[in-house]
Image (tube, grey):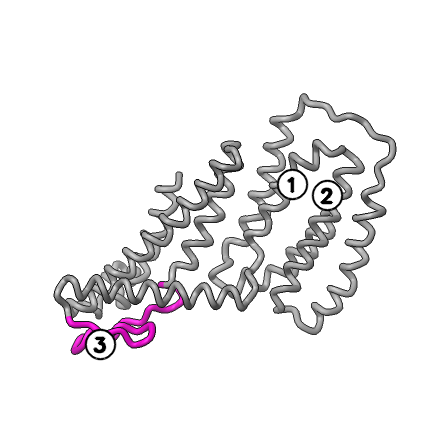
Amino acid sequence: MFGVWGMLIYQLQTTWNLNEQYAHGYLVPLLCLYLAVKTQNVNADSKDIESRDRRAWLYLGVPSILLLFPLWIVREANSDWRLLNVALFACTFLFSLALLYDRRGLRKVKLLAFPLLFFAVAIPWPLAMDLQLTQWLQGRVSSLIVDSLLLLGHEVRLRGNVIDVGVFGQVGVDEACSGIHGLQASLVVTLFLGAYYNLGIVRRMVYCIAGTIVALALNLARAFCLSYFQVKGKGDLLHEPLFSMFGTDAPSLHDMAGWIESGGILILLI
């Protein structure tokens, strides 16, 4: 079982290294392992009904393993194809469930299904869906910022996803300002804490929705504050170090705002 999960991690580690949106990927396997150990410790005293006729490995496990070979061949030709990651995860997940069912029974499958499924938060979304959602968020964030600045009496114009603030230049609402990073971080936190505290299904769903709202709201507040600095002619503070000490530059206001947003999301969700 550990071998197929190692293959999946090996396939995903390139994306985790190169794409900041999925930089949390290295942490996810550790969280999955923790949830699995915690689940087994809590239910260590319960026993499963023995069954002598378990052949899930034959009907589910073997086909999943056999399917990994053509997928790995495709991976050699197109390793960055995101749907390939989904297919590899599906095969790995099904193979693990088959082994768990044959060795420990249905009860163990139910207990460990979520810790295994939680690994999905580290898998890149299909590219088309990722781009469409990011562009939609960029459009909504930029339009809301422009509307807010107009209500405050500032003369600004929206040109695509770029906010024109006149003599003080332009503010671009890029991918990082769309809120997609905070959205994915909130999903990781809410799903993990929901399992950690053993919340019911309805409460987990409500918690995930609340996490999504918190992440998008804080990202909007961050983007608005940065745009407001630009409108007030303080745009030079956004990308220049706030100060230097002993030859080391402090982070810029733009970077510091991103850290504050991430910390705020974590604190509010907890």
Counting from the top left corner in percent of width and height, residue 7 is at 70, 56
Please name the residue that numbered disc 2 is placed on.
Answer: 97
Q: Is residue 84 left or right of 52 when viewed as pictured?
A: left
Q: The magenta stretch spans which residues?
A: 155-177
Inspect the magenta stretch and tell me whether residue 67 lies in it.
no
Q: Which residue sits at x=81%, y=43%? A: 56
Mark with earlier residue (2, 1): 2
Please name the residue that numbered disc 1 is placed on.
Answer: 113
* Residue 180 quadrant: bottom left
Split into 4 quadrants, where in the image is the C terminus? top left
Please name the residue that numbered disc 3 is placed on.
Answer: 169
Q: Is residue 177 visible?
A: yes
CB within 8 Å, label 2 to label 1: yes
Q: Is residue 36 left or right of 214 when viewed as pictured?
A: right
Q: Amino acid at mark 1?
A: Ala
In the displayed image of the protein, which residue is found farthest to the top?
Answer: 45
Q: CA distance from mark 2 to mark 1?
A: 8 Å
Counting from the top left corner in percent of width and height, residue 208 is at 45, 44
Q: Which mark lies nearer to you, 2 or 3?
A: 2
Question: Crowding near pointer 3: few (<14 within 10 Å), some, many (20+)?
Answer: few
